[in-house]
Amino acid sequence: MNHRPLDLDVAIYRDRVQVTNRATTTFADQRAYRSFSSDQSVVAEPARFEDTIVRAIRQIAHGDKALMLCDPVAHVVGCETPLNHLERGIVQTALHQSGIRTVVFEID
């Protein structure tokens, strides 16, 4: 079975993650059950961030069964505050552990 890429836009806020499937424009707004941010960092708790983004992707998957045949590719297109080099690494690691193969950072 050939996998096709899934192109996602990811927006990170201190209390939520928003994910959009660029091909279908399916949108998910997932509030964090447990805060992943601190006063110093938007992504201070990687495991909590990962939990939140996985829940957002599952929201999209629920309405798009073809999602299960995809290799997700994420474009982080926005963040509440600019990410520093360390935070970008944390986000990339959390997304990778969530099954997202490639991350392209386009932080506003």
Image (tube, rainbow, N blue to C red):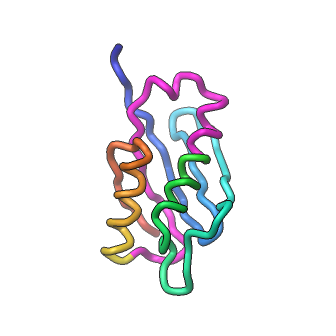
Which residue is rendered at x = 46% and y = 64% of the image?
Answer: 46
In the image, taking residue 17 as reference, residue 76 lies left or right, namely left
* Frontmost residue, 30 versus 10: 30
Q: Position of residue 70 (x, y in %)?
A: 43, 28
Q: Position of residue 2 (x, y in %)?
A: 33, 17
| Residue range (magenta) | 56-83
- Seen in the picture, residue 108 relative to 59 is either above or below; the reply is below
In the image, taking residue 18 as reference, residue 99 lies left or right, namely left
- Seen in the picture, residue 64 relative to 33 is either above or below; the reply is above
Q: Quadrant of the N terminus?
A: top left
Q: Position of residue 52 (x, y in %)?
A: 58, 55
Q: Quadrant of residue 14?
A: bottom right
Query: Is 62 inside the magenta-drawn segment?
Result: yes
Which residue is rendered at x = 32% and y = 66% of the image?
Answer: 89
Which residue is rendered at x = 65% and y = 68% of the image?
Answer: 15
How many numbered circles does the render carry?
0
Q: Position of residue 69 (x, y in %)?
A: 45, 23
- Seen in the picture, residue 83 relative to 10 is either above or below; the reply is below
Which residue is rendered at x = 59% and y = 33% of the image?
Answer: 61
Residue that lies at the very extreme toward the bottom in this rendered image: 39
Query: Is 108 inside the magenta-drawn segment?
Result: no
* Frontmost residue, 106 versus 31: 31
